[in-house]
Structures are given as C-alpha cells and as structure tokens.
Image: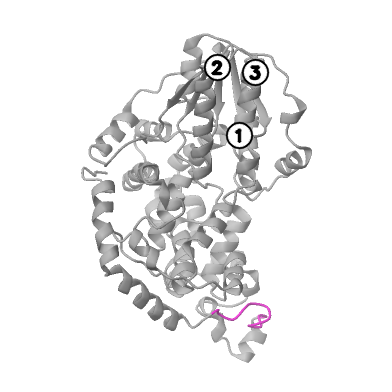
Amino acid sequence: MNIVWFKRDLRLSDHLPLLEAIKADEPTLLLYIYEPSLINDRHYSIRHWRFVQQSLNVLNEVLIKAGNKIYIFYGNATEVFGYLIKNYPVKNIYSHVETGLKLTYQRDLDLNDLFKNNKIQWFEYNQNGVKRGLKNREGWVKNWYDFMQKEIPHIEVNKVRPVDLTIPEVFQIRKSFQKKLLTLNNEMQRGGFNYARRYLRSFLLKRHQDYNKNISKPNLSFKSCSRLSPYLAWGNISVREVYQYVGSKQNLANKRSISAFKSRLRWHCHFIQKFEMEHEMEWRPINKGYDLLEYDFDQKIYNAWRTGNTGFPMVDASMRSLIRKGYVNFRMRAMLISFLCHLCNQSWENASTWLSKLFLDFEPGIHYPQIQMQAGLTGINTIRIYNPVKQAYENDEKGNFIKEFVPELKDVPVPLLFEPHKLTASEQIMYNCRIGEDYPKPLFELSKAYSAARERLWKLHKSAPVKNDKNRILKKHTVKDRKV
C-alpha cells in the first residue's frame, strides 16, 4: 500500500504526488491529518481549519464518484503514520515539500526517521517553483518561468486504486472540533478547488479591469483584486494553474492589470523561497542588527489594535475587516503592521501572531518576510511608516470602507470621518458619536509618534550591525535576473 499525504495542496490537479502514486499502480490511501499541535498553534484559528474542511468536502464529492475518498485522521502525524505502518503493508509515501513553520519542519524530521527505520521511501515534490537547499537566488527567475510553463499533466482520479480501512476511534475527529468546523461564516470565502476556479474565471472575465487602479483601496479591492490568496495558500489551486490559465486567455480588457497580476504570482513564490532559505525569521529578525531594537509592551495598546479600537478609523476598519472577513488588501495589512510596530513601538512578534490567526490566506512563507519587511527589520528595504489619516484620505476618499466596518462613525461626514477626535461637542451630538464613549480617542498624538518612530528606526538603520548583515542578505536573497 502507498500513501498520498495531503497537506497544503488540497486539489486534484497539478498534483505530482498523486500522479506518481497513480503511476506506481498500487492500492493507495489518500490521507489528510488534522494535527492537534497545528490546531492549537499560536498561528492558527478555527477559520483556517473550517476552510480546510470545506476543501476536503469538495475533494471527496469528486472522489466518492470515482469510488474513492480522502481518509481524515485526527492526531499526531507520527502516531498516525506509526499506526498505519504497524497495521498495513505501507511501501511508499508521496507528498509535496512543505515550506512551513518550525513545528512542521520538526515533524517532518521525525517522520523521516520513522520512515527510514521502517524501510519506507518518502517521495517529496517541489511545487510553485520553490526549491529546498538553495544557497543564493542565481538563475531563480528563469527556473521559475521554466517551471510555470511546463505542461500540467492530466490526472485521472478514477485510476487511483482505493484501499478500504476503518479509522480507529482514537484517530477520529473530536466531536467538539467537528462542530466548530461545521459552523459556517458566510462573510468569509469558502474552501474548495471549485471556488478557486470561479474566482479565477470571474477575475479574468471582468473584475481585473480595475485591478491596478483599486489595488490599494480597501473597499474597492474586495472586487477588483483576484481574491485567490486563500486558495493558493491552502493549495486549492496551484500558482502554475493560475499562471497558465491567465496566459491562455486572449483579448483581456486590461493587459496592464494582467501583467501586474502575473508579476505578483512570481512575487508570491519569491517570498516563499526567501522563507525556505532563511526560516529563522519566524523567531528572529532577518537582519541580526535589529536584535538591538527595543520595543515597549503595553497591553492596553495591543488590545486596542487587536480589536480595532485605536481611535484611528482606517486602522480600526482594516482590523475589523480581518476579524469579520479574514481579508483586507495588502496596503492595509502593511499599514496595520507599521502602525503597531512603528507608531506604537510594539513588537513584530505580537503583530505576527495576531494577524496570522486572522488572515484566512495565512501562508508562513509570505507572512514572515512581509511582517519583517513592513516592521522595518530587513535593512535592505525602504522603511515605511504609514500615516493612517493620509491612507484614509487617499484610499477611502468617500469613507465607505470606514463606515462599513466602523458603524459608530456612519453619520460622520468626510473629512471629519478620518479624524473624528476633532469633532466639536456640538458636532458629536449632531453626528451621533461621542468621542471617548461611542468611539475611542486616539491612542496617541500622531505627529509625536511619527517623529519618535522615525528617529528610532533610522538611527538603527544606519548602525554598523545592520549595515554588516545587509550585505549578507543581499548576497543570499537578491534576484538579479528579474523581469515581469
């Protein structure tokens, strides 16, 4: 018996482990494991596992018609595989390489030992043009394009030879967890490769037309952006499938937007490759010089940021959008990180932990490079201290986004909406919003916080430790043969 282990690749197309298992022509167990260590990990919340379960349901709808299914176990991966090896004649394991957290990397090391000790071969396959073991990025872009342009072989799922087994009670999904999985949230995107394809088709049919124009605008980006990020993060569709599908379409309305979108597909993989090559950024600054950066910790400030009650409407609307929908556009994500780390001087680790729970599209390989870039910890990127008032003026001109997610301010007109603490006593009565009661006062005076952050960050940016490690980072991660 062979095993195909599904992880962040919940699809039946462009799936090399599945294809190779079919070629082996042995009875094959299709396996997914809910791992309590991941479920309880600080990076995750139930929204992620609900998306996974929805994705598995869609897969099984297809597989059951072909006389097969994915068997869903609940337990420690080493114990699950140990049970299967002890009770069934397991020959080979097929899976994708996972660029994940330290937790999953250590799990894979433990499994590697288990498989070797039992003379079982584990075949792991790269996906999305990301490779393990690279020392630098020389030739990476060319190799990425070569990978993206390779023909995607057709997979006939009815050729997977099924196995029949009973999941023992100890490895069955706990009822309390199952109940949470089945509790729907209709404001969030649903998991499944069918939904991924729907979003892709609708983006190319019409929504892409204002992609470039609206990409920074949180309200308009709900429709103008592709919204494929959770489907890519959980593998409902591969980057290569998206890339080739886009390339196959002629006469698209806005070629400039499409070109920008295709470029971002490459950047998606670029950041995962960066994390693959320097995974220590999960727990320390990529530029070691920033170990010297001292943060404050103020629980009141942190809680205000986490709940969207900072007194800065654009920040609060962005956070509440994430809480409700699991999504806000890239510019607002960058602003949220900048606000906490720069203007509040709170640690990047606290920003990372909370946001990973909220991002439905949490992908470790993108999450950590972006957190560190926006927190100004690389030494090679421009330090951006986002002004939340300026962002409101530029990217929510009519105030629709703020009024949607901060209803306390729905009667306040623009431009007072962007700085409601400036409302006079009579205006507060007129617009049904008492500052300090219905909506909080700002946590601090923006101009003072901005000046303090700029002085603190640029002083360290110019320091010898930061400059010294900057050269190492450039040598290791710079992509020289960059093209659109």
Residue ID for mark 1: 55
Type of amino acid at the residue the image marks with label 2: Val
Q: Where the C terminus falls, by quadrant? A: top left
How far apart, in angstroms, are the residues tagged by discs 1 and 3?
Answer: 29 Å
Type of amino acid at the residue the image marks with label 1: Ser
Q: Is residue 188 left or right of residue 259?
A: right
How far apart, in angstroms, are the residues tagged by discs 2 and 1?
Answer: 16 Å
Q: Is 442 within the magenta?
A: yes
Q: Sequence order check: which comes first, mark 1 or mark 3?
A: 1
- Tell me which segment is drawn in magenta: 432-443
The crowd level at tag 1 (other Cα within 10 Å; few <14, some 14-19, many 20+) is many
Q: Is residue 234 left or right of residue 462?
A: right
Magenta stretch, main secondary structure, is loop
Q: Which mark is residue 157?
A: 2
Badge 1 vs badge 3, beta-carbon distance below 8 Å: no
Q: Is 335 within the magenta?
A: no
